[in-house]
Amino acid sequence: MENLIVLKYGGTSVGTLDRIKNVAEKVAKLHRSGKNIVVVVSAMAGETDKLLGMAEKLIDKPARREIDLLLSSGERISCALLSIALQALGCPAEAMTGRQIGMHTDDAHTRARIIHIDTTKTLKKLKENKILVVAGFQGINEDGDVTTLGRGGSDTSAVALAVALKAEQCEILTDVDGVFTADPNIVPNARKLDMVSFDEMLEMASLGAKVLQIRCVEFAKKYNMPLLVRSSFEDQSKGTLICKENKDMEQPIVSGVMRDDKQAKITVKGVVDKPGIASEIFTALGNAGLSVDMIIQNISAEGHTDISFTLASVDCDEAIAIMEAITDKIGLKEILVDRKISKISIVGAGMRSHSGVAAKMFQTLSAEKINILMISTSEIKVSCIIEQKHSKLAVQQLHSAFNLEKKPRRITKKQ
Amino acid sequence: MENLIVLKYGGTSVGTLDRIKNVAEKVAKLHRSGKNIVVVVSAMAGETDKLLGMAEKLIDKPARREIDLLLSSGERISCALLSIALQALGCPAEAMTGRQIGMHTDDAHTRARIIHIDTTKTLKKLKENKILVVAGFQGINEDGDVTTLGRGGSDTSAVALAVALKAEQCEILTDVDGVFTADPNIVPNARKLDMVSFDEMLEMASLGAKVLQIRCVEFAKKYNMPLLVRSSFEDQSKGTLICKENKDMEQPIVSGVMRDDKQAKITVKGVVDKPGIASEIFTALGNAGLSVDMIIQNISAEGHTDISFTLASVDCDEAIAIMEAITDKIGLKEILVDRKISKISIVGAGMRSHSGVAAKMFQTLSAEKINILMISTSEIKVSCIIEQKHSKLAVQQLHSAFNLEKKPRRITKKQ
């Protein structure tokens, strides 16, 4: 639809009635300027955790189907309230649940994937000049049960709606001003990036930048939907545009430094070194839905070897249980666990055409006597596992070593 | 469905996680005893008021459509939590929203009426031995928008489901032990009634007994579905059975005394006394959806008369505005308002066959020097409007005058 913009406000932005009023005023202004608007909202800050906390007091692992019904209420409340706040300003707003906006998903409760979006009703209402206020994070499956898209799923709701409705742009309004070269809490002179490519953002999101959910960026990339991430609190915020790589973009070698402290390293010692053992281990973990990040296999000695891998620390206990279950099968002698590690990463599309970036990272860490435990690389990132106690220092030193506080010169070819 | 019981737990009964666990234990026990069970729940105590309060901070009169979406979240939360609590006890429970249980209503938001209930899915799940935990108070209209059935609507949900599913009985579990001869807070020796007829309960509900919503009783009467009202806190509670009048029933002349302090009296003075004026007044009020209770027209003097009527005090301001708007049309001179009144009523199916009941009521009030401002009667009730300051005394004296603290002898004809 022409002139359509999809906005998404996070939980902090709708966390109180005053903030909801504030959001309503901004949306009303934009609507009066002639835009067609769909606003997706998260639950009021703290609501989702409160609801989940109640369920977990009743049972350790509540059924995912009931959790989806429970948690989806949070977004329904904030969406009804924002719609009412818009009506109070004289705007023709209508609150819409996931079902009403036509969000059909598979039935993987608590992490459902969008199958298709039925836009008939939505387009009709938009043509009647209505502002649609949508409960994010939720949809329904084929049986009509409520599903949710996983934590941060409202971002995905917004992008998916923007794609389905052929919006001009999707804006993610949040409590930060955009994507930064590093966490400003750790690196005070971290710089906001004006533009970031989808690929860089994907790496950043998976490496610990919390500003956007990975699936939302994947979706945006797949359908080439530009995402503007900006602050809902500062009207002047220009934010960060996440879009297809193009020549107008800043082309620094490194765009940002990320830190992820929520990692754990498991080492299985003395496993038999024969074909199929690694496969045995990682198939068992994969079957349990655990996502392994880095893997190292030591050089074999006397027919035995050690294998280390990292994964999200929340999955650590389950992984240990799985290893214990296959102890005999793989002939392992000991399981070591290290939860005090961090993953430090540098990301930059410019790495593709520059060599020596990884070497510079290793030198920088080495100069600070920070030991590198594991390394993994892709075309546009280098990640190192280090001891957690060094993680802040590592981020600060890398930020400085790659001059990220300075705006890189554009390498645009203008006529 | 054979062996099916529909239970309804009110907001106080599911007001905390501990109470939800407590309800789950009772339901689980009943299910293990071989019953098929549908449990309807209200929102956790205080939740509906909290949500409504938020909306009313945004605008005086929020749109009814958004209010329905907002308030319906409360029941979704409690129903998901009770379902989780039942699963924690090993029961095959499933949470169902109004839509999922097939509750189709008209589109009169905030006071929708049930049009039909699609029981296909529900019966299928019940045959799989599932306990269905239903979010009360809500349904959907033809457009798929969420609707609600009005305050106390969960009672109506429960009765309607019991009827549609051909349940054996519908139990309303609440924070009181049943229906009493008077409010025990005012009359300490008020007696719990074992049985009450639908007609008596209808009068009682409309006259200030808060234990059941009128519509729920109307529904139960229409389809002859026995309702058992009892305490969710005391396992031994036998409660009050509300059913069709029968010969086994206690047949006291008066079953109970009710008090309603939320009434106001409006007097329009000096209106022209000609045909059509009363119609003008009450049509105007009716068109605005205001429900007038009692009406008195004074004897005419010099071509003018005074008309007094009572209505719910919440509607009083609107009624005054309407009277002011038609001042010229009906030629009225003055509007008097009295908000300090009470309606005191006695109800009893036995009145039909006994004369002198009203006279005894008037004598009792008169003996206490309580002035009667207005009177209305039906086959099975007498109501008097009195000054509010006398209302407690009036209830106590009437309770005693009709010997309500004593169990009446049964007038059953046994062989």
Image (cartoon, coloured by chain):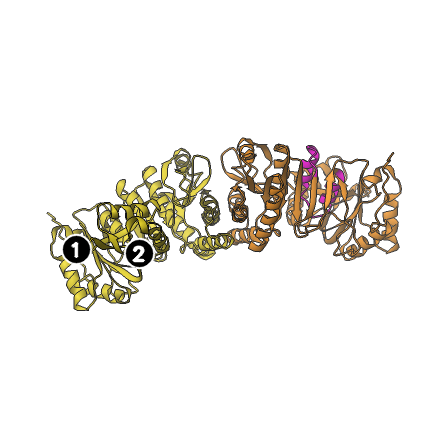
Chain colours: A yellow, B orange
Q: Residues within 10 Å of mark 2 (few under 14, many from 20)?
A: some
Highlighted magenta segment, given as a residue range: B199-226
Dominant secondary structure of the magenta stretch?
Answer: helix
In the depicted structure, whether residue B162 falls above or below residue A228: above
Is residue B229 rendered magenta in the image?
no
**In the rendered image, is residue B346 in sight?**
yes
Q: Which mark is residue A237?
A: 2
In the depicted structure, whether residue A122 falls above or below residue A177: above
Mark 2–mark 1 Cα distance, whole angstroms, equals 22 Å
In the depicted structure, whether residue B95 falls above or below residue B184: above
**Percent x, y for residue B279?**
71, 36
| Residue B202 in the figure: left or right of residue B252 | left
Q: In which quadrant is the C terminus of chain B drawn?
A: top right
Q: Residue furthest front?
A: A302
Q: Residue at 40% x, 56% y: name it.
A: A12
**Percent x, y for residue A54?**
50, 54
Is residue B210 rendered magenta in the image?
yes
Image quadrant where residue B390 sits: bottom right
**Label 1 sits on what residue type?**
Pro
Tally of numbered discs: 2
Q: Residue at 11% x, 54% y: name it.
A: A355
**Label 2 sits on what residue type?**
Ser
